[in-house]
Amino acid sequence: MKTEHDKEIESFFAQLKEKDNEIQIPDFPKAKRQRSVNWWIPLGIAASLVMAAWFFARDEAVQSLEQDVIIITLEEKPNHELQFKIERTSELESWESPTSSLLNEF
Amino acid sequence: MQHEQLEQTVKALHRDAYIWARQCCRFDDEMAKDVLQQVYLKILESKAVYGGKSSVKTWLFSVIRFTANGSMAQANAILPLLEDYDVPDEMVSGYADQSPEELIQLLPAKQREVLLLVFYHGLTLEKAAEVMEIGLGTVRTHYDRGKKNLKKLIEKSRIEQ
């Protein structure tokens, strides 16, 4: 596309290029690559899950008794017959006062 | 193309990229630095994606031109010169002391851009059309008109000297 007549223009641009050799080119910036995933979010979720698991999975306090106790409960069979169930244990997970019924039912 | 490969190619084109950015910013060094910084950030954050349809140089020049035009518009630095503007034939004084940079800035933006891309950066008219995001026929018109106008300006400055 360039013709003989373009020589004048070419010399003009050669002059411009020569002048541009004096230009100080800034350094190519050093790229600080950002992590594509912000790891704080998954780490936070993982920490919350661990805390929740620890909170719910920890053993409930089991009270050790100084001596064995006998637990007598009254159970109703399918044929509406009542029967005493007697158990002996040295650990008590829940305890109810034998006289607690008196608080409500006197 | 891998991101690292692209980064290496862009790094190799850094000088040309800076000069083109400067030319797009009407030879303003500070604005050119800002524009180039924005361009590199766009590439790093994958906001400007190389599709492989053209050469990296053509693509990079196109991103620079687009970003520079945005900055120039924000700075209200774009002069509303008509693209079909021709340098008047009658003698107008004041060209003698002008440097090549000042002289080429007298041309309308598209005429200036196509001449810089072809004569300074050695791109073909097809590549220049890609960078300028216009059709080949339109680029040819700006190219012919730009050459004619620049010749007139060179002659006038020579006569005055």
Image (cartoon, coloured by chain):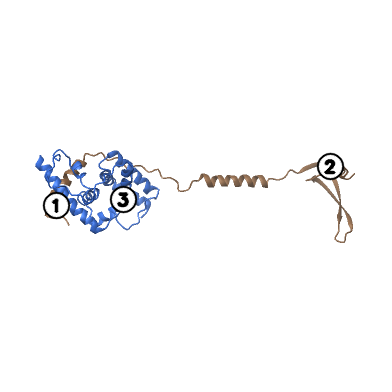
Foreground disc of the pair 3, 1: 1
Subunit of mark 1?
A: A
The residue lying toward the viewer, choosing from B138 and B46, is B138
- Kindly identify which residue carries mark 2: A67
- Kindly identify which residue carries mark 3: B60
- Kindly identify which residue carries mark 1: A6
The image quadrant that residue A20 belongs to is top left
Relative horizontal placement of residue B21, taking residue B160 as reference (left or right): right
Q: Are marks 3 and 2 on the same chain?
A: no
Looking at the rendered structure, the kind of residue marked 2 is Gln
Looking at the rendered structure, the kind of residue marked 1 is Asp
Residue placed at 28% from the left, 53% from the top?
B132
Under circle 2, the secondary element is: strand
Q: Where residue B27 sits: x, y (%)? A: 25, 41
Under circle 3, the secondary element is: helix
Foreground disc of the pair 2, 1: 1
Under circle 1, the secondary element is: helix
